[in-house]
Image (cartoon, helix red, strand yellow):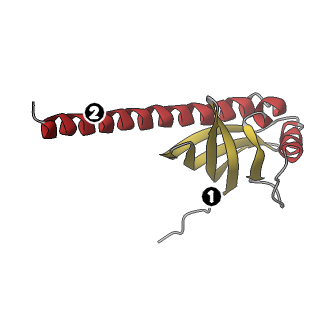
Amino acid sequence: MRLTHVLSIAVLLTGCQTMQSQDVAKLEILSATRAWADALNTCNPARIAALYDREAVLWATTSSSITSTPEGVRKYFDGVCASPTPPKVQFGEQLIRVHGDTAIDSGSYTFTVIEGREMAVPARFTLAYRKVGEQWLIVDHHSSLRPVPRKQ
């Protein structure tokens, strides 16, 4: 076999491995985001907070200030879970991008809250992750209410 053919095959195989690792990483991010939803839906503040990096920033849907400490993240979710009827979350669209040991998951989710009656609260999110060892941890979480579409 000529050297150029060998090099071409090597480049092709390397590209396939990169594609496979990107797909695996995207599945890992999907799993990490589901773990966050499961922790919120069972309202376990310690489990939720454990999914955030020590230097994580949280700009939460219902918060008037940004949080940048592990204690602040835990306190926020302690408050969320203190409600007699804690919210539940269900994810809609998600767009996951992986860039080495960092990844971003952006999309929409809907919180179901009960305040006298059940209400759906549509929101949008961005979760930025960093891989630490074998675990993807949230390093930045931004969530805001989703605007109602304008009528044309």
Which is more foreground, mark 1 or mark 2?
Answer: 2
Q: Determine which quarter of the picture holds residue 118.
A: top right
Q: Secondary structure at mark 2?
A: helix
Residue under the image location 82 percent in, 54 percent down: 67
Residue under the image location 84 percent in, 43 percent down: 70
- For residue 13, the mark is 2
Q: Earlier in the sequence, mark 1 or mark 2?
A: 2
Residue 86 position within the rendered picture, expressed as x and y whole percent measured from the top left: 81, 36
Q: Quadrant of the N terminus?
A: top left
For the residue marked with disc 2, what is the amino acid? Leu
Residue 70 falls left or right of residue 10: right
- Towards the viewer: 134 or 150: 134
Residue under the image location 76 percent in, 27 percent down: 42
Instruction: For label 2, count other residues whose C-alpha is less than 10 Å away and answer few (under 14), some (14-19) or many (20+).
Output: few
* Residues at discs 1 and 2 in contact (Cβ within 8 Å): no
Q: Determine which quarter of the picture holds residue 64.
A: bottom right
Residue 141 falls left or right of residue 92: right
For the residue marked with disc 1, what is the amino acid? Arg
- For residue 146, the mark is 1
Q: Mark 1 to mark 2: distance in Å?
A: 43 Å
